[in-house]
Amino acid sequence: MNKFNIREISAGSVETVIKDIGFDESYISRASGKYRFKLFKISDLSCPQATIIKQLALSAGADAALHREVITCKVKKTDLLLGCASSQLENICNKLNSQPFGLKNLSEQLLPLLKQKPENLAARGKIFDWAEKTYIMGILNVTPDSFSDGEKYLNSEKAAAHAKGMVEAGADIIDIGGESTRPFSKEVRPDEELERVIPVIKKIREFNDIIPISIDTRHSRVAKEALKAGADIINDVSGLEWDENMAKVAAEVGVPVIIMHSLDSPETMQVNPVYDENIIDAVYKDLGEKALKALQAGIKSKNIIIDPGIGFGKTFEHNIELIKRAGEFKSLGYPVLIGISRKSVISKILDIPSEEKEGANIALNSFAASQGVNIIRVHDVAAHYKALKMLDKIIKN
């Protein structure tokens, strides 16, 4: 019996393999869509809508999974998982255009997802091209009680020196925070927060006027003063909701904002975090709503970054699922940031001190980057710079 030489081809290698085979090069780009498999979850469909999509999928050679009682109409709504090649999706969408129950609108939303990518972002003259590389945000906590490096950088000279070291090690952004947001931490008064962060921002600007600085704060007054002192980005763990003036400040100045998902305040977020639906759906919907509010407040789409908020009102299982499926948040159309560095999700698996977690940090962050996460927030910039530079060589076009 003949033994055939067979192997599975990775999705990202389709065009290379087709070219190597000797396929017509002028048709490679169009033909490759037949070999790229896509999965889309569509929520809250009526039974008629779901049934039509299922039938159109089958007619295109694809398939769709939906609630078992749709056929009996014993359920009013169902979610649907559509599995298809890129070319099949185009076929399905063309047919949806002539269907009732508002399905033409679904077609208009689905097709752009094939080519969707977040807009490039600009901060302090630096262009963040998300197709080019995975960017590194270096953490600089100027607090007495942060879980990993509390008290280390309270002195502005030491803090600025540490920032300089992170820049030299390859950081693309320095994230400065004057309020610990670890679980059960209490709110810091804006006056005290300003006393911690403003001198550090000014010190950094004395030796470096190029590196973008983000201010990690929930308070609009702190954000405003930090921006005046030389910061460029607002990183708000409350998703612009703690302080009603935060979105207004960001819109007026026209700076990028990082909108994070959290469950209540740091003081109470880890007290039995419970969600009415699965964690991915809950966080995805919340971030979508927060981003919409930001747009309505006047913040430009190109200035929005989203963060699923690892450790902010989540159980260990929630955190693992968010890391595993971090790439799904790209469907919102914004660049995705993730902050895993030295958090308890690692301690649940490895019983080691914070300073010994870097190997685990690199493993998790490299996985997140491979799923399409655009910015990785870390303590150890040098180690991540090397790991992500190698990874980007493989995963970035």
Image (cartoon, helix red, strand yellow):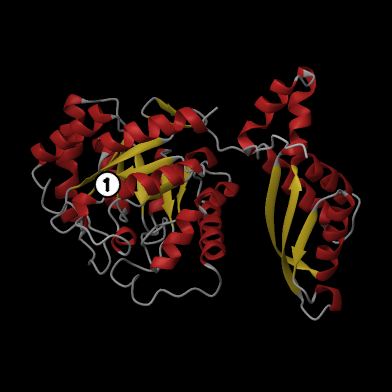
| Residue drawn where x is 25% and y is 41% of the image | 380
Give the residue furthest to the front.
1
SS of the residue at dot 1? Answer: helix
Q: Report x, y in % for residue 298.
A: 51, 46
Q: Report x, y in % for residue 386.
A: 33, 31
Quadrant placement of the N terminus: top right
User: Quick check: 129 above or below 296?
Assistant: above
| Residue drawn where x is 40% and y is 73% of the image | 273
Q: Report x, y in % for residue 133.
A: 45, 30
Query: Of residues 57 and 151, which is closer to you in this image?
Result: 57
Q: Report x, y in % for residue 299.
A: 49, 44
Q: Inspect this view and state whether residue 157 appears.
A: yes
Tag 1 residue: 358
Query: Of residues 99 and 248, which is closer to you in this image?
Result: 99
Q: Quadrant of residue 255?
A: top left
User: Quick check: 107 above or below 158?
Assistant: below
